[in-house]
Image (tube, rainbow, N blue to C red):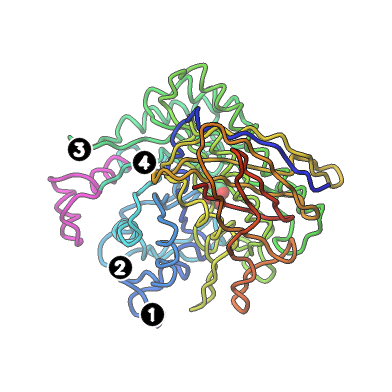
Amino acid sequence: PTEGASATIHGDRPGPTYDRRIFTQFAEHLGNGIYGGLWVGQNSKIPNTRGFRNDVVGALKGLNVPVVRWPGGCFADEYHWREGIGARAKRPVKINTHWGGVTEPNTVGTHEFFDLTELLGAEAYVAGNVGNGTPREMAEWVEYMTAPAGSLADERAKNGRKAPWNVPYFGVGNELWGCGGNMRAEFAADETRRYATFIKAPAGTRILKIAAGANVDDYKWTETMIAQAAGQVDALSLHYYTIPGGWPPRASAIDFDEAGWAETLFEANRIDELITKHSAIMDKYDPNKRVWLAVDEWGTWYAGDPGTNPGFLRQQNTLRDALVAAIHLNIFAKHADRVKMTAIAQMVNVLQAMVLTDGAKMVLTPTYHVFAMYKPYMDGTVLPIEVNSRWYAKDKWSMPAVSASAVRGKDGVVRVALANLDPNQPATVTTTLAGVTATTATGQILTAPAITSLNSFEAPQTVRPVAFTGASVANGTLNVTLPPKAVVMLELR
Ligand code: AHR
Protein backbone atom coordinates (compact mmCIF):
# COMPACT_ATOMS: atom_id res chain seq x y z
CA PRO A 1 0.00 0.00 0.00
CA THR A 2 1.24 3.49 -0.72
CA GLU A 3 -1.04 5.24 1.74
CA GLY A 4 1.37 5.92 4.57
CA ALA A 5 -0.02 8.34 7.07
CA SER A 6 -2.39 11.14 7.83
CA ALA A 7 -1.18 13.91 10.07
CA THR A 8 -2.07 17.28 11.55
CA ILE A 9 0.43 20.05 12.28
CA HIS A 10 -0.72 22.48 14.94
CA GLY A 11 0.75 25.85 14.07
CA ASP A 12 -1.98 27.22 16.31
CA ARG A 13 -0.51 25.47 19.37
CA PRO A 14 3.20 26.33 19.37
CA GLY A 15 5.25 24.23 21.75
CA PRO A 16 8.66 24.61 23.39
CA THR A 17 11.90 25.63 21.73
CA TYR A 18 13.79 23.00 19.76
CA ASP A 19 17.00 23.82 21.57
CA ARG A 20 20.09 24.22 19.41
CA ARG A 21 21.97 22.21 22.04
CA ILE A 22 20.07 19.12 20.85
CA PHE A 23 22.75 19.13 18.13
CA THR A 24 25.64 18.96 20.60
CA GLN A 25 28.61 16.85 19.49
CA PHE A 26 30.79 14.57 21.56
CA ALA A 27 34.57 14.27 21.13
CA GLU A 28 36.29 11.73 23.36
CA HIS A 29 39.91 10.64 23.59
CA LEU A 30 38.99 7.38 21.93
CA GLY A 31 40.45 5.78 18.83
CA ASN A 32 40.80 8.44 16.15
CA GLY A 33 38.09 10.65 17.59
CA ILE A 34 40.68 13.28 18.51
CA TYR A 35 44.12 12.17 17.30
CA GLY A 36 44.13 11.76 13.54
CA GLY A 37 40.48 12.75 13.20
CA LEU A 38 40.58 16.29 14.54
CA TRP A 39 44.16 16.83 15.60
CA VAL A 40 47.10 16.17 13.32
CA GLY A 41 49.55 18.65 14.81
CA GLN A 42 51.03 21.78 13.32
CA ASN A 43 53.81 19.95 11.47
CA SER A 44 51.45 17.62 9.62
CA LYS A 45 51.23 17.64 5.83
CA ILE A 46 47.48 17.62 6.29
CA PRO A 47 46.42 21.27 6.12
CA ASN A 48 45.63 22.42 9.63
CA THR A 49 45.09 25.41 11.84
CA ARG A 50 47.26 25.27 14.94
CA GLY A 51 47.11 21.46 14.69
CA PHE A 52 43.39 20.94 13.92
CA ARG A 53 42.75 19.66 10.42
CA ASN A 54 41.06 22.20 8.18
CA ASP A 55 38.91 19.72 6.23
CA VAL A 56 37.24 18.28 9.32
CA VAL A 57 36.82 21.62 11.05
CA GLY A 58 35.39 23.06 7.82
CA ALA A 59 32.90 20.22 7.49
CA LEU A 60 31.82 20.55 11.11
CA LYS A 61 31.40 24.30 10.73
CA GLY A 62 28.81 23.43 8.12
CA LEU A 63 26.71 21.92 10.90
CA ASN A 64 26.89 24.98 13.20
CA VAL A 65 27.93 22.68 16.03
CA PRO A 66 26.51 24.45 19.10
CA VAL A 67 28.39 22.64 21.88
CA VAL A 68 31.23 20.10 22.09
CA ARG A 69 31.41 17.63 24.99
CA TRP A 70 34.98 16.64 25.96
CA PRO A 71 37.19 14.77 27.03
CA GLY A 72 34.84 11.78 27.57
CA GLY A 73 32.97 9.56 28.12
CA CYS A 74 34.69 6.94 30.16
CA PHE A 75 37.95 8.76 29.49
CA ALA A 76 36.75 11.70 31.60
CA ASP A 77 36.74 9.75 34.85
CA GLU A 78 40.43 8.91 34.43
CA TYR A 79 41.53 12.26 33.04
CA HIS A 80 43.85 14.49 35.03
CA TRP A 81 43.76 17.94 33.56
CA ARG A 82 47.23 18.97 34.74
CA GLU A 83 48.72 16.35 32.42
CA GLY A 84 47.28 18.24 29.45
CA ILE A 85 48.67 21.74 30.05
CA GLY A 86 52.08 23.34 29.56
CA ALA A 87 54.68 22.56 26.90
CA ARG A 88 53.31 19.74 24.75
CA ALA A 89 56.62 17.93 24.52
CA LYS A 90 56.80 17.69 28.28
CA ARG A 91 53.33 16.30 28.89
CA PRO A 92 53.20 12.77 30.30
CA VAL A 93 52.35 9.95 27.92
CA LYS A 94 49.73 7.73 29.52
CA ILE A 95 47.88 4.58 28.55
CA ASN A 96 44.29 4.97 27.45
CA THR A 97 43.11 2.03 29.51
CA HIS A 98 39.52 2.25 28.34
CA TRP A 99 40.04 2.54 24.67
CA GLY A 100 42.43 0.15 23.04
CA GLY A 101 45.25 0.36 25.58
CA VAL A 102 47.10 2.76 23.28
CA THR A 103 49.28 5.64 24.38
CA GLU A 104 47.62 8.94 25.19
CA PRO A 105 50.12 11.73 24.55
CA ASN A 106 48.04 14.43 26.23
CA THR A 107 48.81 16.63 23.22
CA VAL A 108 45.22 17.81 23.13
CA GLY A 109 44.48 19.26 26.53
CA THR A 110 42.48 22.14 27.90
CA HIS A 111 44.04 24.88 25.75
CA GLU A 112 43.75 22.85 22.56
CA PHE A 113 40.14 21.91 23.32
CA PHE A 114 39.12 25.51 23.75
CA ASP A 115 40.97 26.40 20.57
CA LEU A 116 38.84 23.78 18.81
CA THR A 117 35.62 25.21 20.24
CA GLU A 118 36.70 28.64 19.06
CA LEU A 119 37.50 27.32 15.58
CA LEU A 120 34.04 25.73 15.46
CA GLY A 121 32.21 28.64 17.09
CA ALA A 122 30.86 26.16 19.65
CA GLU A 123 30.37 26.28 23.41
CA ALA A 124 32.31 24.02 25.75
CA TYR A 125 30.84 21.15 27.73
CA VAL A 126 33.69 19.87 29.90
CA ALA A 127 33.23 16.56 31.69
CA GLY A 128 35.01 16.32 35.04
CA ASN A 129 36.65 13.40 36.78
CA VAL A 130 34.58 12.03 39.65
CA GLY A 131 35.74 8.44 39.16
CA ASN A 132 39.38 8.65 40.17
CA GLY A 133 39.80 12.36 40.76
CA THR A 134 39.05 14.50 43.76
CA PRO A 135 36.71 17.44 44.37
CA ARG A 136 39.81 19.58 44.77
CA GLU A 137 41.25 18.54 41.41
CA MET A 138 37.91 19.26 39.76
CA ALA A 139 37.53 22.62 41.50
CA GLU A 140 41.04 23.65 40.49
CA TRP A 141 40.39 22.75 36.87
CA VAL A 142 37.29 24.92 36.88
CA GLU A 143 39.27 27.72 38.47
CA TYR A 144 42.10 27.30 35.94
CA MET A 145 39.63 27.62 33.08
CA THR A 146 37.43 30.41 34.39
CA ALA A 147 39.16 32.54 37.03
CA PRO A 148 39.89 36.15 36.08
CA ALA A 149 42.72 36.38 38.64
CA GLY A 150 44.79 34.35 41.06
CA SER A 151 47.67 31.93 40.70
CA LEU A 152 45.76 29.45 38.52
CA ALA A 153 44.74 32.29 36.20
CA ASP A 154 48.40 33.36 36.11
CA GLU A 155 49.42 29.82 35.20
CA ARG A 156 46.82 29.79 32.44
CA ALA A 157 48.20 33.08 31.13
CA LYS A 158 51.75 31.70 31.25
CA ASN A 159 50.49 28.79 29.17
CA GLY A 160 49.18 31.16 26.54
CA ARG A 161 45.66 32.18 27.54
CA LYS A 162 45.18 35.35 29.52
CA ALA A 163 41.41 35.77 29.34
CA PRO A 164 39.27 33.25 31.20
CA TRP A 165 37.30 30.82 29.10
CA ASN A 166 33.60 30.44 29.31
CA VAL A 167 32.56 27.02 30.62
CA PRO A 168 28.80 27.04 30.22
CA TYR A 169 28.39 23.28 30.86
CA PHE A 170 30.27 21.02 33.23
CA GLY A 171 29.63 17.30 33.63
CA VAL A 172 29.86 15.90 37.14
CA GLY A 173 31.49 12.66 36.01
CA ASN A 174 30.17 10.22 33.43
CA GLU A 175 28.36 6.90 33.74
CA LEU A 176 29.00 6.71 37.47
CA TRP A 177 27.03 3.44 37.42
CA GLY A 178 29.75 1.92 35.20
CA CYS A 179 33.14 3.13 33.96
CA GLY A 180 32.84 6.23 36.16
CA GLY A 181 33.21 4.17 39.33
CA ASN A 182 30.61 1.37 39.41
CA MET A 183 28.68 3.29 42.02
CA ARG A 184 25.29 2.52 43.44
CA ALA A 185 22.73 5.23 42.67
CA GLU A 186 22.61 6.40 46.30
CA PHE A 187 26.39 6.75 46.49
CA ALA A 188 26.51 8.45 43.09
CA ALA A 189 23.89 10.95 44.23
CA ASP A 190 25.96 11.77 47.32
CA GLU A 191 29.14 12.07 45.26
CA THR A 192 27.34 14.30 42.78
CA ARG A 193 26.21 16.59 45.62
CA ARG A 194 29.71 16.71 47.02
CA TYR A 195 31.61 17.33 43.78
CA ALA A 196 29.04 19.77 42.43
CA THR A 197 29.37 21.85 45.59
CA PHE A 198 32.90 22.78 44.59
CA ILE A 199 32.21 23.64 40.96
CA LYS A 200 31.99 27.40 41.31
CA ALA A 201 31.54 29.96 38.60
CA PRO A 202 33.28 33.34 38.94
CA ALA A 203 30.99 36.27 39.75
CA GLY A 204 28.76 37.23 36.87
CA THR A 205 29.07 33.88 35.07
CA ARG A 206 27.18 30.60 35.24
CA ILE A 207 28.23 27.01 34.90
CA LEU A 208 25.36 24.61 34.32
CA LYS A 209 26.11 21.31 36.02
CA ILE A 210 25.09 18.07 34.38
CA ALA A 211 24.83 15.01 36.61
CA ALA A 212 25.72 11.57 35.31
CA GLY A 213 22.37 10.01 34.57
CA ALA A 214 20.91 6.64 33.84
CA ASN A 215 21.79 3.95 31.40
CA VAL A 216 18.85 3.03 29.15
CA ASP A 217 15.92 2.03 31.38
CA ASP A 218 17.52 2.32 34.81
CA TYR A 219 14.61 4.30 36.24
CA LYS A 220 15.75 3.75 39.82
CA TRP A 221 18.92 5.66 38.96
CA THR A 222 16.93 8.61 37.65
CA GLU A 223 14.60 8.56 40.64
CA THR A 224 17.50 8.50 43.11
CA MET A 225 19.44 11.24 41.35
CA ILE A 226 16.50 13.58 40.89
CA ALA A 227 15.31 13.01 44.45
CA GLN A 228 18.72 13.29 46.12
CA ALA A 229 20.96 15.43 43.95
CA ALA A 230 18.72 17.73 41.88
CA GLY A 231 19.40 20.67 44.20
CA GLN A 232 23.05 20.74 43.16
CA VAL A 233 22.65 20.33 39.40
CA ASP A 234 20.89 21.79 36.37
CA ALA A 235 20.55 18.68 34.22
CA LEU A 236 20.52 14.94 34.44
CA SER A 237 21.92 12.92 31.59
CA LEU A 238 20.61 9.79 29.90
CA HIS A 239 22.66 7.46 27.71
CA TYR A 240 20.97 5.26 25.18
CA TYR A 241 22.68 3.48 22.30
CA THR A 242 20.94 1.70 19.45
CA ILE A 243 22.59 -1.73 19.48
CA PRO A 244 21.06 -4.28 17.13
CA GLY A 245 21.77 -7.74 18.51
CA GLY A 246 22.25 -6.31 22.01
CA TRP A 247 25.27 -5.85 24.26
CA PRO A 248 28.12 -6.39 23.59
CA PRO A 249 27.82 -4.83 20.14
CA ARG A 250 28.29 -7.53 17.52
CA ALA A 251 26.28 -6.57 14.44
CA SER A 252 28.06 -5.33 11.35
CA ALA A 253 27.72 -1.67 10.44
CA ILE A 254 27.45 -2.44 6.74
CA ASP A 255 26.63 -6.10 6.24
CA PHE A 256 22.96 -6.46 7.20
CA ASP A 257 19.67 -7.57 5.72
CA GLU A 258 16.17 -6.14 6.05
CA ALA A 259 15.73 -7.74 9.47
CA GLY A 260 18.88 -5.90 10.63
CA TRP A 261 17.44 -2.68 9.22
CA ALA A 262 14.11 -3.19 10.98
CA GLU A 263 15.64 -4.21 14.30
CA THR A 264 17.91 -1.16 14.30
CA LEU A 265 15.10 1.29 13.54
CA PHE A 266 12.88 -0.41 16.12
CA GLU A 267 15.61 0.00 18.73
CA ALA A 268 16.10 3.63 17.74
CA ASN A 269 12.40 4.29 18.31
CA ARG A 270 12.82 3.09 21.90
CA ILE A 271 14.25 6.48 22.81
CA ASP A 272 10.65 7.76 22.83
CA GLU A 273 9.56 5.39 25.60
CA LEU A 274 12.78 5.95 27.54
CA ILE A 275 12.48 9.73 27.54
CA THR A 276 8.78 9.50 28.38
CA LYS A 277 9.41 7.33 31.42
CA HIS A 278 12.52 9.11 32.69
CA SER A 279 10.73 12.45 32.25
CA ALA A 280 7.68 11.21 34.17
CA ILE A 281 9.94 10.41 37.13
CA MET A 282 11.60 13.81 36.87
CA ASP A 283 8.16 15.44 36.73
CA LYS A 284 7.31 14.03 40.16
CA TYR A 285 10.21 15.85 41.78
CA ASP A 286 10.63 18.74 39.38
CA PRO A 287 7.19 19.60 37.99
CA ASN A 288 8.38 22.95 36.68
CA LYS A 289 11.05 21.21 34.60
CA ARG A 290 13.94 23.25 35.93
CA VAL A 291 16.29 20.29 35.54
CA TRP A 292 16.76 19.27 31.92
CA LEU A 293 17.22 15.81 30.60
CA ALA A 294 20.44 15.80 28.59
CA VAL A 295 20.57 12.74 26.33
CA ASP A 296 24.28 13.29 26.00
CA GLU A 297 25.16 9.96 24.39
CA TRP A 298 22.99 8.41 21.70
CA GLY A 299 23.43 6.71 18.36
CA THR A 300 24.25 3.36 16.82
CA TRP A 301 26.87 1.01 18.21
CA TYR A 302 27.95 -1.90 16.03
CA ALA A 303 30.94 -4.22 16.00
CA GLY A 304 34.02 -2.28 14.93
CA ASP A 305 34.86 -2.31 11.23
CA PRO A 306 36.88 -5.40 10.24
CA GLY A 307 40.60 -4.87 10.67
CA THR A 308 40.24 -1.97 13.11
CA ASN A 309 41.21 -1.97 16.78
CA PRO A 310 38.00 -3.09 18.59
CA GLY A 311 38.77 -0.53 21.29
CA PHE A 312 38.56 2.28 18.73
CA LEU A 313 34.82 1.90 18.04
CA ARG A 314 35.36 2.75 14.40
CA GLN A 315 32.27 1.96 12.34
CA GLN A 316 30.99 2.78 8.87
CA ASN A 317 27.75 4.66 8.50
CA THR A 318 24.98 3.81 6.07
CA LEU A 319 21.55 5.00 5.05
CA ARG A 320 20.30 3.02 8.07
CA ASP A 321 22.24 5.38 10.36
CA ALA A 322 20.67 8.35 8.62
CA LEU A 323 17.23 6.98 9.48
CA VAL A 324 18.32 6.38 13.08
CA ALA A 325 19.41 10.02 13.31
CA ALA A 326 16.14 11.30 11.84
CA ILE A 327 14.07 9.13 14.22
CA HIS A 328 15.93 10.55 17.22
CA LEU A 329 15.76 14.16 16.04
CA ASN A 330 12.01 13.78 15.46
CA ILE A 331 11.41 12.20 18.85
CA PHE A 332 13.44 14.91 20.59
CA ALA A 333 10.94 17.45 19.23
CA LYS A 334 8.16 15.65 21.09
CA HIS A 335 10.07 15.97 24.36
CA ALA A 336 11.58 19.41 23.87
CA ASP A 337 9.99 20.66 27.09
CA ARG A 338 12.44 18.52 29.09
CA VAL A 339 15.16 17.63 26.59
CA LYS A 340 17.31 20.73 26.10
CA MET A 341 20.52 19.02 25.13
CA THR A 342 21.49 15.82 23.39
CA ALA A 343 24.81 14.63 22.00
CA ILE A 344 25.20 12.01 19.34
CA ALA A 345 28.17 9.71 19.92
CA GLN A 346 30.53 10.74 18.48
CA MET A 347 31.67 13.60 16.26
CA VAL A 348 34.58 12.10 14.28
CA ASN A 349 35.62 8.49 13.53
CA VAL A 350 33.87 6.97 16.56
CA LEU A 351 30.48 5.19 16.57
CA GLN A 352 27.79 7.12 14.65
CA ALA A 353 30.13 9.80 13.40
CA MET A 354 29.57 12.92 11.29
CA VAL A 355 32.81 12.43 9.39
CA LEU A 356 35.26 9.59 8.85
CA THR A 357 38.91 10.09 8.09
CA ASP A 358 41.77 7.90 6.92
CA GLY A 359 45.06 9.72 6.80
CA ALA A 360 44.49 12.80 4.67
CA LYS A 361 41.14 11.53 3.36
CA MET A 362 37.79 12.60 4.78
CA VAL A 363 34.22 11.65 3.96
CA LEU A 364 30.88 13.01 5.17
CA THR A 365 28.58 10.28 6.47
CA PRO A 366 24.85 9.92 5.81
CA THR A 367 24.37 11.00 9.44
CA TYR A 368 26.22 14.24 8.70
CA HIS A 369 23.73 15.02 5.96
CA VAL A 370 20.76 14.45 8.27
CA PHE A 371 22.27 16.87 10.78
CA ALA A 372 22.74 19.39 7.98
CA MET A 373 19.12 18.98 6.87
CA TYR A 374 17.79 19.50 10.41
CA LYS A 375 20.09 22.46 11.16
CA PRO A 376 17.35 25.07 10.65
CA TYR A 377 15.49 23.48 13.59
CA MET A 378 17.99 25.09 15.97
CA ASP A 379 16.15 27.28 18.46
CA GLY A 380 12.94 27.16 16.45
CA THR A 381 9.51 26.49 17.98
CA VAL A 382 8.23 22.94 18.01
CA LEU A 383 4.81 22.61 16.40
CA PRO A 384 2.84 19.63 17.69
CA ILE A 385 2.29 17.03 15.00
CA GLU A 386 -0.14 14.14 15.27
CA VAL A 387 0.65 11.27 12.96
CA ASN A 388 -1.52 8.29 12.22
CA SER A 389 0.80 6.00 10.32
CA ARG A 390 0.61 2.66 8.63
CA TRP A 391 2.93 0.18 10.33
CA TYR A 392 6.03 -1.33 8.85
CA ALA A 393 6.96 -4.83 10.00
CA LYS A 394 9.74 -7.27 9.30
CA ASP A 395 10.04 -10.48 11.28
CA LYS A 396 9.39 -9.60 14.92
CA TRP A 397 10.13 -5.89 14.46
CA SER A 398 7.23 -3.54 13.81
CA MET A 399 6.88 0.22 14.06
CA PRO A 400 5.03 3.15 12.49
CA ALA A 401 6.33 3.54 8.95
CA VAL A 402 6.38 7.33 9.09
CA SER A 403 8.37 9.34 11.64
CA ALA A 404 7.73 13.10 11.69
CA SER A 405 8.32 16.42 13.40
CA ALA A 406 7.58 20.06 12.65
CA VAL A 407 9.33 23.25 13.76
CA ARG A 408 8.72 26.91 12.98
CA GLY A 409 12.26 28.18 12.50
CA LYS A 410 13.66 31.38 13.92
CA ASP A 411 13.28 32.68 10.37
CA GLY A 412 9.51 32.12 10.63
CA VAL A 413 9.53 29.28 8.08
CA VAL A 414 7.67 26.11 9.06
CA ARG A 415 9.72 22.99 8.37
CA VAL A 416 8.43 19.46 8.38
CA ALA A 417 10.68 16.42 8.67
CA LEU A 418 9.28 13.14 7.41
CA ALA A 419 11.05 9.80 7.33
CA ASN A 420 9.76 6.65 5.66
CA LEU A 421 11.18 3.71 7.58
CA ASP A 422 9.74 1.16 5.17
CA PRO A 423 12.53 0.11 2.81
CA ASN A 424 10.13 -1.34 0.25
CA GLN A 425 6.99 0.78 -0.04
CA PRO A 426 6.50 4.48 -0.69
CA ALA A 427 4.25 6.31 1.75
CA THR A 428 1.82 9.06 0.94
CA VAL A 429 1.41 11.46 3.85
CA THR A 430 -1.62 13.76 3.94
CA THR A 431 -1.15 16.51 6.48
CA THR A 432 -3.71 19.03 7.64
CA LEU A 433 -2.11 22.39 8.33
CA ALA A 434 -3.81 23.98 11.31
CA GLY A 435 -2.62 27.53 11.87
CA VAL A 436 0.04 27.27 9.19
CA THR A 437 -0.38 29.36 6.07
CA ALA A 438 1.50 27.99 3.09
CA THR A 439 1.13 27.55 -0.63
CA THR A 440 4.36 25.75 -1.50
CA ALA A 441 6.43 22.90 -0.08
CA THR A 442 10.01 22.51 -1.23
CA GLY A 443 12.91 20.73 0.31
CA GLN A 444 15.49 18.00 0.27
CA ILE A 445 15.49 14.23 0.33
CA LEU A 446 18.15 11.82 1.54
CA THR A 447 17.89 8.31 0.21
CA ALA A 448 20.03 5.83 -1.71
CA PRO A 449 19.77 2.73 -3.87
CA ALA A 450 20.17 0.21 -1.03
CA ILE A 451 19.56 0.04 2.71
CA THR A 452 23.30 -0.57 3.04
CA SER A 453 24.35 2.34 0.82
CA LEU A 454 27.20 4.34 2.30
CA ASN A 455 29.74 7.02 1.48
CA SER A 456 33.25 5.68 1.02
CA PHE A 457 36.43 7.60 0.33
CA GLU A 458 36.22 6.32 -3.25
CA ALA A 459 32.50 7.11 -3.70
CA PRO A 460 31.73 9.89 -1.21
CA GLN A 461 28.48 11.09 -2.78
CA THR A 462 26.37 7.92 -2.78
CA VAL A 463 24.15 9.09 0.09
CA ARG A 464 23.57 12.83 -0.05
CA PRO A 465 20.61 15.17 -0.02
CA VAL A 466 19.09 16.29 -3.30
CA ALA A 467 16.12 18.49 -4.16
CA PHE A 468 12.75 16.90 -3.40
CA THR A 469 9.78 17.44 -5.66
CA GLY A 470 7.24 15.05 -4.16
CA ALA A 471 5.36 17.57 -2.01
CA SER A 472 2.58 20.06 -2.69
CA VAL A 473 0.18 22.22 -0.71
CA ALA A 474 -3.47 22.75 -1.62
CA ASN A 475 -6.34 24.11 0.48
CA GLY A 476 -4.54 23.85 3.78
CA THR A 477 -3.32 20.31 3.15
CA LEU A 478 0.26 19.18 2.59
CA ASN A 479 0.51 16.16 0.31
CA VAL A 480 3.77 14.24 0.23
CA THR A 481 4.80 11.01 -1.41
CA LEU A 482 7.80 9.65 0.40
CA PRO A 483 9.94 7.13 -1.44
CA PRO A 484 10.95 4.06 0.58
CA LYS A 485 13.85 4.39 3.08
CA ALA A 486 14.07 8.16 2.90
CA VAL A 487 14.42 11.25 5.04
CA VAL A 488 12.76 14.42 3.76
CA MET A 489 12.99 17.97 5.11
CA LEU A 490 10.38 20.36 3.74
CA GLU A 491 9.99 24.10 3.93
CA LEU A 492 6.46 25.45 3.78
CA ARG A 493 6.12 28.95 2.38
O1 AHR B 1 30.81 6.69 23.49
C1 AHR B 1 31.57 5.61 23.93
C2 AHR B 1 31.40 5.32 25.41
O2 AHR B 1 30.09 4.92 25.64
C3 AHR B 1 31.58 6.48 26.35
O3 AHR B 1 32.90 6.70 26.67
C4 AHR B 1 30.81 6.04 27.55
O4 AHR B 1 30.29 7.12 28.28
C5 AHR B 1 29.75 5.14 26.99
O5 AHR B 1 29.71 3.93 27.67
Considering only order in the chain, which callout, 4 or 3, is on the residue closer to the N terminus? 4
Distance in Å between CA atoms under marks 4 and 1: 32 Å
| Percent of width and height locating residue 258 | 81, 55
Considering only order in the chain, which callout, 3 or 2, is on the residue closer to the N terminus? 2
Considering only order in the chain, which callout, 2 or 1, is on the residue closer to the N terminus? 1
| Percent of width and height locating residue 144 | 23, 48
The majority secondary structure of the magenta stretch comes to helix
Q: Which residue is mark 3?
A: 202
Position of residue 362 in the picture relative to residue 65 (left or right):
right
On whether ligand 1 comes within 8 Å of the CB at mark 2, the answer is no
Q: Which disc is residue 44 wearing? A: 1
- Residue furthest to the front in view is 475
| Percent of width and height locating residue 33 | 49, 62
Residue at x-position 51% and y-position 73%: 362
> Which stretch is magenta?
138-165
Q: Are circles 2 and 4 on residues that touch, CB within 8 Å?
A: no
Position of residue 10 in the picture relative to residue 59 (left or right):
right
Residue at x-position 43% and y-position 62%: 62
Viewer-proximal residue among 171 and 274: 274
Q: Quadrant of residue 5?
A: top right
Residue at x-position 43% and y-position 41%: 380
Residue at x-position 16% and y-position 60%: 158
Q: Which residue is mark 2?
A: 88
Is 69 colored magenta in this rendering? no
Distance in Å between CA atoms under marks 3 and 4: 14 Å
Above-or-below relation of 291 to 366? above
Considering only order in the chain, which callout, 1 or 4, is on the residue closer to the N terminus? 1
Question: Mark 2 falls on what kind of element?
Answer: helix
Viewer-proximal residue among 250 and 321: 321
Q: Nearer the viewer, mark 2 or mark 4?
A: 4
